[in-house]
Amino acid sequence: MRIRNAVADDLAPVTTLYNHYVTTSSATFDLEPVTCEQRRPWFEQFTTNGPWQLLVGETEHADDGALIGFACSTPLRPRAAYRRSVETTIYLAPDAAGRGLGATLYRALLDALAAAGVHRAYGVVTVPNPASTALHEKLGYERVGRLSECGWKFERWWDVAWYEYRFGTEAR
């Protein structure tokens, strides 16, 4: 897998992958698929070296370059004091799961965030989701909380668990 910063041409395949999870999974609480135009403001917030980044993983074949997955960091909250805390997210193509690619892609994001001076990263995992729970714990996230029945999707209530990744204790 080749990992790189997202570019404008990635908007469509990233949106397509995301929409797969909108329609088939509780991993996101969006209820309806989004268009590229709806997703564009989200896509345009990312930088290549700041706290809000979008990395894509693609096949290594130069003539193929098919999207395997994406990992990103977004603002945790809108207030300025939260600027060094981010929410992290990862989505893999369904046929890419179970091969360690998610851990590789997520680790690349965490390394980029460390270089950008991020202090804490938070993963929000719908419960149950054993694969996402295992991935977060494997990478060193610690479960710090759970919100009960906070999302209604597929005609049922879902809990979410919050996971925290600590980059360090020094002031930034």
Image: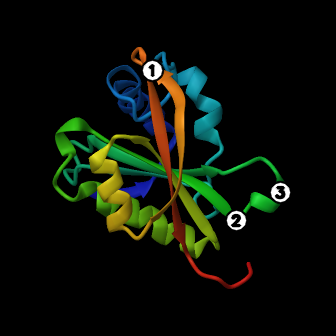
Badge nearest the viewer, 1 or 2: 1
Q: Depth check: give the residue in front, 4 or 169.
A: 169
Q: Which mark is residue 162?
A: none
Query: In the shown orientation, is residue 21 left or right of residue 33?
Result: left
Residue type, mark 3 in image: Ala
Is mark 3 in CB contact (under 8 Å) with mark 1?
no
Real-space Cα separation, disc 2 to disc 3, in angstroms = 9 Å
Is mark 2 in CB contact (under 8 Å) with mark 3?
no
Query: In the shown orientation, is residue 30 left or right of residue 128?
Result: right
The C terminus lies in which quarter of the figure? bottom right
Residue holding disc 3 = 80
In the structure shown, which secondary structural element does the residue marked by tag 2 occupy? loop
The N terminus lies in which quarter of the figure? bottom left
Where, by quadrant of the figure, is residue 94 drawn?
top left
In the structure shown, which secondary structural element does the residue marked by tag 1 occupy? strand
42 up-or-down from 96: above or below: above
Query: In the shown orientation, is residue 127 left or right of residue 53?
Result: left
For the point 32% across and 43% down, the residue is 129
Instruction: Residue 9: give x, y in percent of width and height.
Output: 45, 36
40 up-or-down from 38: above or below: below
Residue holding disc 1 = 153
Instruction: Residue 69: give x, y in percent of width and height.
Output: 33, 45
